[in-house]
Image (tube, rainbow, N blue to C red):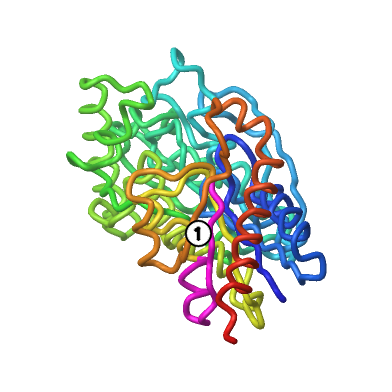
Amino acid sequence: MKIVIAPDSYKGSIYAPQAARAMRVGVLRVLPDAEVVLVPVADGGDGTLEALVATSSGESKTAEVTGPMGEQVRASWGALGDNRTAVIEMARTSGLALVPTDKRDPLVATTFGLGEMIEQALESGYRSFILGIGGSATNDAGSGMAQALGIRLLDRNGADLPFGGGALSELSRIDMKGIDPRVSESEFSVACDVNNPLTGPEGAAAVYGPQKGATSDVIGRLDKALAHFAKVVRRDIGPDINDIPGSGAAGGLGGGMIAFLGGHLRPGGDIVLEAVNFDQYLNGANLVITGEGQLDFQTVYSKAPIGVAQRAKQKGIPVIAVVGSLGDRFTDVHEHGINAASSIVPAPMTLETASENVFDLIASATEQAIRMLHTGSQVFRPT
């Protein structure tokens, strides 16, 4: 019997590679002779780097870069086993989690460190990029990233703009002449699972500004600055990014990726599954086991377990999910390829306790799921 194990991370508790190993322990307790294939996956958010590095036999690298508030931070990026593709999560260079609540200020927060990390990967020879852009502390439309890559953003006096989304209101001209020439040799796949435009009531500042420390007055300033930025981009570079779905992601970084790097915004789960060539692992499989922190109605919207299940369904392979918790309308996933789901929590316990024991809980829950399937195969075996 061949079983493919392809979980996402259980956010805040365990990354996908470790979760996959825990599931393998549970399977082998029941079926010690089974062929178990581990393919940890992700949806472009937290844990994407670890999942892709593990599946591709790549390695993690570190860099000293500029953090969102101008401080130096040490951040990891992934070099995949193909020796061509780099994986970067912008949350590690410019993320909200890097800024204490009382220090958050999207008027000055910058993506400069993201550009520095891209520069390091270019210097190391990588020309294909997978970029996760969730969890940003910024609202600068990727302007800091652009500056780190040699693009000049100039005010009416010809001076370079300072960091932050607030400065975009002073943008007069974009000078692309100094951009690192290796950018044009590269491809940028951007994991983006939201459809927000750059500006307006559903735009970057209005929807995501409050969690980054923006008051109502600051939201208005940022929205106007982004609208002005979009006009200058259209005049000086070409693309009209204001209304492109996803351009408002990560404080307008989605739009900046398109404008400055020619990036392609795509669902994160699709990018990851294609990067690991997931379909090849399904050949000859009898069962797929997936999982994540919580299964609920939101899972069906481009989450990694659904991508796994849909690919397995195309090959007629049953899929079960072993998850941290079962949330609101979790049964919606049954219409999208997941045949059954169960929680790893066997009794009432705090989230802290569950997180501390997550490896053993996943292993035990997987063991019980396999025992149920094994018993069912005996009960319902044709006579």
Please say whether residue 190 is visible from this viewpoint.
no
Element marked by disc 1: helix
Looking at the image, residue 259 sits to the left or right of residue 121; the answer is: left
Residue 246 percent across, percent down from the top left: 33, 53
Where, by quadrant of the figure, is residue 53 drawn? bottom right
Please say whether residue 279 is visible from this viewpoint.
yes
Q: Which quadrant is the C terminus positioned in?
A: bottom right
Residue 161 percent across, percent down from the top left: 41, 32
Q: Residues within 10 Å of mark 1 (few under 14, many from 20)?
A: many
Q: Residue at x 59, y 51 (%)?
A: 48
Q: Is residue 375 above or below residue 49?
A: below
Identify which residue, 133 or 14, lies in the foreground. 14
Q: Is residue 252 above or below residue 223?
A: below
Q: Residue at x 42, y 33 (%)?
A: 138
Where, by quadrant of the figure, is residue 46 drawn? top right
Residue 215 percent across, percent down from the top left: 26, 19
Amino acid tagged 1: Pro
Residue 85 magenta: no
Where, by quadrant of the figure, is residue 116 drawn? top right
Say which residue label 1 marks.
305
Residue 320 magenta: yes
Identify which residue, 119 or 348, lies in the foreground. 348
Q: Residue furthest top?
A: 102
Identify which residue, 342 or 94, lies in the foreground. 342
Q: Which quadrant is the N terminus positioned in?
A: bottom right
Q: Residue furthest right?
A: 33
Residue 312 percent across, percent down from the top left: 53, 74
Looking at the image, residue 282 sits to the left or right of residue 44; the answer is: right
Q: Residue furthest front?
A: 383
Q: Residue at x 77, y 60 (%)?
A: 28
What residue span does the magenta drawing correspond to? 308-323
